[in-house]
Image: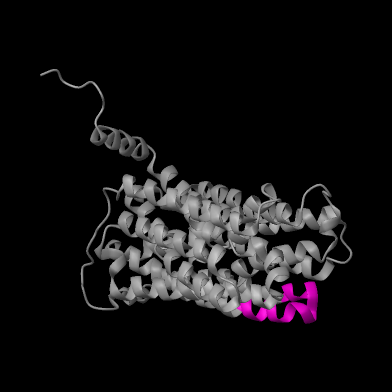
Amino acid sequence: MQQSLTPSKTDSSSFFAKLLQSNPVATIALAQLFGTSLWFSANSAADDLRRAWGASISDIGLLTSAVQLGFILGTLVFAMSGLADRFPASRIFAACAVMGAVFNACFAWLSHGLTSAAFLRFAVGICLAGIYPIGMKLIVSWAPERTGSALGYLVGMLTLGTALPHGLRWLGAQWPWQAVIGSSSALALLAAVVIFVLGDGPHLRKKPATKQLGAVLVAFRSEAFRAAAFGYFGHMWELYTFWTIVPLLVMQTATHLNLRGISVSGRSFAIIAIGAAGCIVGGILSRRVGSARVAAVALATSGLCCVIFAAAWQRLSASALLVLLLVWGTSVVADSPQFSALSAMACPPELVGSALAVQNSAGFAITIVSIAITTSFFSHLGVAVVWMLLPGPLLGLAGLYPLWRKSTAQ
């Protein structure tokens, strides 16, 4: 019998897997970009929702907080149950990306008011708990020797994913808002396929050393883990609230006078997306000067941008404001991957997935408070509300102090 020369489906799948595994960090980062585009998809349609539903600024903040609340619940379940370390990370990622895509599409096409929209955004948040922290675990499983720089690429893609809905809104200015949000679902489905085929890295430990519920809290006994976690908590007070109000800062300052050919969505995309460059450059620098120093410099820069913007936004030109927002957008997230790297290095390897999940859970609980306060007061204080972001970098520097003091002394 003549042997068929046509490649089998198994051969094709094997070739695809090998292709993805030839550069697993880039593969995971790309999947993170597509998967996390679900996060701020509703914010890209803020103007449409305000017209269609009569939604206020605080209502848009509520939708963002619903995602954060779902993410918190999801990460708590993963962390406290040990699910993040008991099952293959790639399968968890793929399943959550598929479910997140479905809930996001339902939000776009089936919700008709804030109540149903908030519920569906909450469900998306739960699914994101299986995408973002699990993506970090996948990075560690494939490239543990360069955690800081690899996580820089990963969080850079998270940042681009956050900005992507604004970019899609800008490019598809004539699209219905439902189509813009639906495109994020399509990207998330692609992310699920890519990670499912890639699989877990060779350095993954699937089962924790202990199966006791809540064993992950052992990580907080480490001074290094506590310092990284507390620095991260301060950073989170500022980060997601800044991303939430970027379009408002653009619309209500002289920034909208610059680059007249580019919409608010286009400028918002640039201010948020440039943070990806900050993450990548910070990751590269971390291999030379250490993650703690990179995180400290980023926190200090972000805090300084906050002070300058809050104190001088009425006196600065449109160009100067845009440059300031771009610098702020670069530094506000550049420290994020370094906090994750510091935490991953400070806890037992078999608890990395759960430890990062519980750290993320606490950090995102902080964002709910920050977003709620800031969006509630925006109508009363206007742009001056950015002063409320300043405690984040200040407290983050204080929490991180034991680590960056040690790194400076070395």
Residue 156, horizontal then vertical, whole percent: 54, 52
Q: Quadrant of residue 75?
A: bottom left
Residue 63, horizontal then vertical, whole percent: 59, 73
Q: Is residue 384 magenta?
A: yes
Q: Is residue 223 visible?
A: no
- Residue lying at the far top in this picture: please name it: 2
Placement of 236 over or under 256, stated as above or below: below
Which part of the image, by quadrant, shows the N terminus? top left
Range of residues picked out in magenta: 370-387
Colour scheme employed for the rendering of this structure: one colour
The count of marks equals: 0
Question: What residue is rendered at 26% in x and 35% in y?
Answer: 9
Question: What residue is rendered at 49% in x and 49% in y?
Answer: 153
Residue 64, horizontal then vertical, whole percent: 58, 71
Q: Is residue 215 magenta?
A: no
Residue 151, horizontal then vertical, whole percent: 46, 53
- Residue lying at the far left in this picture: please name it: 1
Q: Main secondary structure of the magenta part?
A: helix
Front one among 323 and 107:
107
Q: Is residue 219 visible?
A: yes
In the picture, measured across the screen, residue 50 lies left or right of residue 351, that is right
Question: What residue is rendered at 34% in x and 63% in y?
Answer: 352
Front one among 246 and 127:
127
